């Protein structure tokens, strides 16, 4: 849909999006739309929102040429980064048309990452949710846990590394909290022979010594960040500082659909293969579409990766599950979309957890990957227009009652253990992040009609979490 | 004896049973994640090019991408399905490195079977992360996987598992993890692992329109090796190379190089090569790759050695560790320390190969479980 600007004070912007499609042998027509680069924010963004509201939400550009999803998103960055972001955006657009690039990426996703990941019918989990009369939904798991490195993160990391290589950048930087994104980034840099610097809070480095070691084995340099609370948000600031200084030689691999435009769009497009495969597999398996999609939401990349393909299909329900930590009222959680307010964080306007003075609140979740005070702007948008629903699940619901696992004589607790449940019923140990999505099934399934097809994004495996699980459960 | 015959009969039935094969194929695809890719290791290939720019092309068969991270599940899942079909309700298995234990526990969870895994205390210490994984994978409601420990390591666990099975022949099923033990176990395990070789043939044809020239695999008892070799046994133009663990070195007496340094005898129900002293007592094996630490070897591999169809070499602990680090650095893949032995042998093999030789290495497992071991060893060395 074209939105033409009549305001002559800004550059002409035909705000059409070109979807980036790693080519499946699908018969989907590739819609040729183009971005033009616009690096200035102005009041016309608000004008545009007006127009879009009139035209109806579903047909909105996601994002528009300013990188906005409704009022969310954008590029709130120092002037020095504007050029780099524009360059990145043009590069991304041109590669979307580049058959060689697509072919190379497809080949790597297949042979290196192990795609396509299966859509697995979880028979025993389905059985578990059957009501006394034998009715209940059918549960399918999209097995991103089977990817190389054990999570969905690599889809984006590998594509961005390939893009960086095409741009002639030899140096990659990234920030990491618990180390998962750091390990994924270091992995792809090893694969492509790129220099890799990972910024990590000094506190996090102590708690995750093994991940630090892994990154170093992969040839990356891990730099300790001592400022602030020496955790993820400080590492992110340091990484941005590095990028500002070294923009010509360096590409910043952002791990989620957060950050300034074009990152939310780019990261979503690189993960969109998840949803595309799901559509194809659903068709093969039952000749239809999923009825409900469920995914955990930290920054929001695995959720956008699954949802994106189906946003235009109003008959597909989209459900995101955030981390409620110790509970929404405890003040110790990471449920941004439930409890946050609109503001700017890390270059984008979105919901975020902030106090009355606008200071960012330190979030909490037992799962490091969901422990982020912000959320991708597109999720904020989907929430506001009511296209997607967002709920939250506590640490305990995700991980479970203390007594259940090892003390067999106690009665089964009402709050079941998602982590343990999938391990026990299907022999799949999910990541703690993923466990949040799985935990929500307890609330969701009783409400669903018989035969409803639910696809849960099994975004990662839980090998990394077994120690946490044992520790937590031994209180 | 009669239960072995029964097992053999049942096994032969399922080989031809379309329903079983279909169900297995779906489980291998949707649960395990097959087919596994055959990955062209570009940077590793470049590493082995000589000064003229010549060298072999290295491909990795990515069994590390399977659910639970190794080739073990191909067999564990198929046998668990077989056991269920036979009406057995409980599974007993022995595990060394824990991969077979984890694979069996996962399969039992999926199929709602009781599960007892027996593991040596020494092994439990060295692969504690796998022990935790097994404990989390429960079978029936409120019943955990029982992990029983015995003093020692895999060979002791195996003896104990067989003892346990013999005590409960009607209801329990002994799930062998590898190609050792009495007939039909070696054959069965090989058949279920042979999917690796079948896929390899198909992928080689797709990728370069031919067959592999050389296939390399690590050898503990031999299941991953036979899994990839079996398809190509009759292709004399395909070289088959197995790499065993030389531990601290063949002369140190602390290794697991059964085919290189062992002699023929009977162990765990089969005649094969094994590491025995002058009195016929089993010599305790050693390797940094816990899954290779077995004093015996599958009888079929002994046969392939004697007939000269396959060649067997060794790699030391240090060479394996170096290979582990090399693959991390060059390809961003953490290989299991067992697999690292196969990769280590490339150092000696590649300089001898003509330009363009196609080498397929069975990347039998991922090395997340070994990061701590390597971490500790490196720190001790630096300290």
Image (spheres, coloured by chain):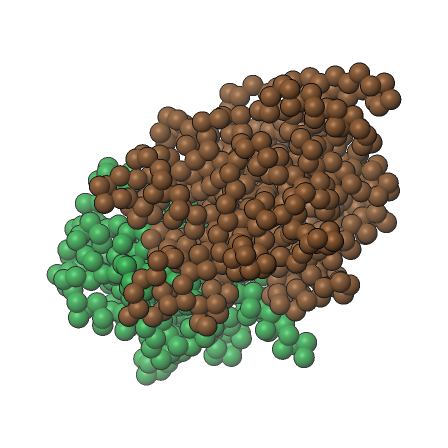
Chain colours: A brown, B green
Tell me: A355 left or right of A57: right
- Indicate the position of residue B351 as horizontal and vertical percent values: 63, 54
In the rendered image of this protein, does residue A444 appear above or below residue B115? above
User: Looking at the image, which residue is at 49% across and 26% down?
Assistant: A313
Tell me: B195 left or right of B141: right
Tell me: B174 left or right of B64: left
Q: Is residue A90 visible?
A: yes
User: Looking at the image, which residue is at 30% across and 40% down?
Assistant: A136
User: Looking at the image, which residue is at 34% across and 70% down?
Assistant: A407
Residue in front for this viewpoint, B161 or A222: A222
In the rendered image of this protein, does residue A20 appear above or below residue B88? above
- Indicate the position of residue B311 as horizontal and vertical percent values: 45, 57
**Please, which residue is most extreme toward the front here?**
A356
Q: What is the count of numbered marks?
A: 0
User: Looking at the image, which residue is at 48% across and 67% down?
Assistant: A472
**Please, which residue is most extreme toward the bottom here?**
B279
Q: Quadrant of residue A409?
A: bottom left
Residue in front for this viewpoint, B258 or A47: A47
Say which quadrant the N terminus of chain A sits in: top right
């Amino acid at each position: 849909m074209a939105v033409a600007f009549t305001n002559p004070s800004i550059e002409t912007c035909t705000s059409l999006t070109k979807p980036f499609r790693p080519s499946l042998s699908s018969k989907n027509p590739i819609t040729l739309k183009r971005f033009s680069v616009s690096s200035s924010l102005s009041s016309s963004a608000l004008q545009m929102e007006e127009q879009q509201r009139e035209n109806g939400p579903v047909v909105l550009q996601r994002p528009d040429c300013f990188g906005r999803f409704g009022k969310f998103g954008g590029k709130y960055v120092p002037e020095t980064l504007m050029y780099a972001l524009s360059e990145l955006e043009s590069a991304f657009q041109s590669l979307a048309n580049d058959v060689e690039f697509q072919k190379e990426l497809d080949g790597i996703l297949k042979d290196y990452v192990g795609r396509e990941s299966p859509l697995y019918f979880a028979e025993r989990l389905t059985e578990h949710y059957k009501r006394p009369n034998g009715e209940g939904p059918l549960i399918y798991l999209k097995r991103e846990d089977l990817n190389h490195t054990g999570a969905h993160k690599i889809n984006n990391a590998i594509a961005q590394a390939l893009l960086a290589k095409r741009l002639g950048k030899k140096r990659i930087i990234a920030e990491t909290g618990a180390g998962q994104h750091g390990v994924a980034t270091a992995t792809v840099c090893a694969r492509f022979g790129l220099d890799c610097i990972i910024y990590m809070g000094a506190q996090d480095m102590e708690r995750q010594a093994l991940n630090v070691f892994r990154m170093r084995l992969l040839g990356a340099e891990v730099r300790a960040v001592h400022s602030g609370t020496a955790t993820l948000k400080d590492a992110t600031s340091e990484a941005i500082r590095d990028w500002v200084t070294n923009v010509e030689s360096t590409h910043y691999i952002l791990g989620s659909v957060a950050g300034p435009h074009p990152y939310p769009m780019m990261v979503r497009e690189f993960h969109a293969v998840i949803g595309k495969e799901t559509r194809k597999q659903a068709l093969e398996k039952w000749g239809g579409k999923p009825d409900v999609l469920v995914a955990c939401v930290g920054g929001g990349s695995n959720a956008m990766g699954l949802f994106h393909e189906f946003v235009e299909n109003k008959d597909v329900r989209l459900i995101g599950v955030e981390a409620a930590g110790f509970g929404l009222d405890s003040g110790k959680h990471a449920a941004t979309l439930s409890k946050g307010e609109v503001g700017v964080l890390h270059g984008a306007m979105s919901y975020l957890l902030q106090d009355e003075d606008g200071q960012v609140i330190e979030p909490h979740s037992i799962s490091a990957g969901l422990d982020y005070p912000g959320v991708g702007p597109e999720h904020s948008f989907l929430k506001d227009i009511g296209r997607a629903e967002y709920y939250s699940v506590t640490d305990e619901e995700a991980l479970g009652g203390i007594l259940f696992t090892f003390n067999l004589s106690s009665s089964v607790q009402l709050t079941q253990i998602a982590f343990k449940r999938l391990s026990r019923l299907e022999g799949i140990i999910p990541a703690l992040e993923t466990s949040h999505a799985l935990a929500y099934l307890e609330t969701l399934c009783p409400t669903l009609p018989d035969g409803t097809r639910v696809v849960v994004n099994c975004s990662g495996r839980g090998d990394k979490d077994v120690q946490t699980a044992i520790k937590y459960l031994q209180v | 004896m009669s239960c072995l015959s029964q097992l053999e009969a049942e096994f032969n039935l399922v080989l031809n049973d379309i329903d079983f094969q279909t169900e297995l194929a779906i489980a291998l695809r949707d649960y395990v994640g097959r087919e596994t890719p055959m990955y062209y290791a570009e940077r590793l290939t470049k590493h082995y090019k000589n000064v003229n720019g010549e060298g072999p092309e290295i491909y990795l068969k990515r069994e590390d991408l399977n659910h639970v991270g190794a080739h073990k599940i191909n067999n564990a899942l198929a046998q668990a399905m077989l056991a269920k079909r036979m009406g057995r309700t409980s599974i007993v298995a022995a595990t060394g490195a824990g991969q077979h234990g984890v694979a069996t526990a996962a399969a039992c969870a999926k199929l709602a079977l009781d599960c007892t895994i027996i593991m040596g205390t020494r092994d439990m210490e060295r692969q504690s992360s796998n022990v935790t994984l097994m404990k989390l994978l429960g079978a029936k409601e409120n019943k955990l996987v029982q992990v029983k420990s015995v003093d020692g390591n895999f060979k002791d666990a195996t003896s104990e598992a067989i003892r346990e099975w013999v005590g409960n022949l009607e209801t329990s099923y002994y799930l062998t993890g590898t190609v050792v033990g009495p007939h039909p176990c070696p054959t069965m395990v090989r058949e279920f692992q042979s999917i690796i070789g079948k896929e390899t043939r198909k992928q080689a044809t797709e990728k370069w329109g031919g067959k592999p020239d050389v296939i390399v695999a690590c050898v503990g008892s031999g299941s991953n090796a036979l899994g990839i070799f079996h398809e190509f046994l009759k292709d004399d133009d395909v070289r088959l190379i197995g790499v065993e663990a030389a531990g601290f070195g063949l002369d140190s007496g602390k290794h697991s190089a059964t085919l290189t340094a062992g002699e023929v005898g009977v162990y765990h129900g089969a005649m094969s090569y094994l590491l025995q002293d002058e009195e016929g007592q089993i010599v305790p094996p050693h390797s940094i790759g816990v899954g290779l630490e077995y004093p015996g070897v599958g009888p079929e591999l002994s046969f392939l050695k004697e007939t000269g169809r396959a060649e067997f070499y060794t790699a030391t602990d240090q060479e394996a560790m170096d290979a582990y680090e090399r693959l991390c650095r060059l390809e961003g893949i953490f290989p299991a320390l067992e697999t690292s032995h196969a990769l280590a042998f490339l150092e000696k093999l590649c300089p001898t190969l003509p330009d363009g030789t196609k080498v397929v290495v069975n990347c039998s497992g991922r090395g997340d479980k070994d990061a701590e071991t390597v971490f500790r060893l490196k720190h001790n060395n630096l300290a």
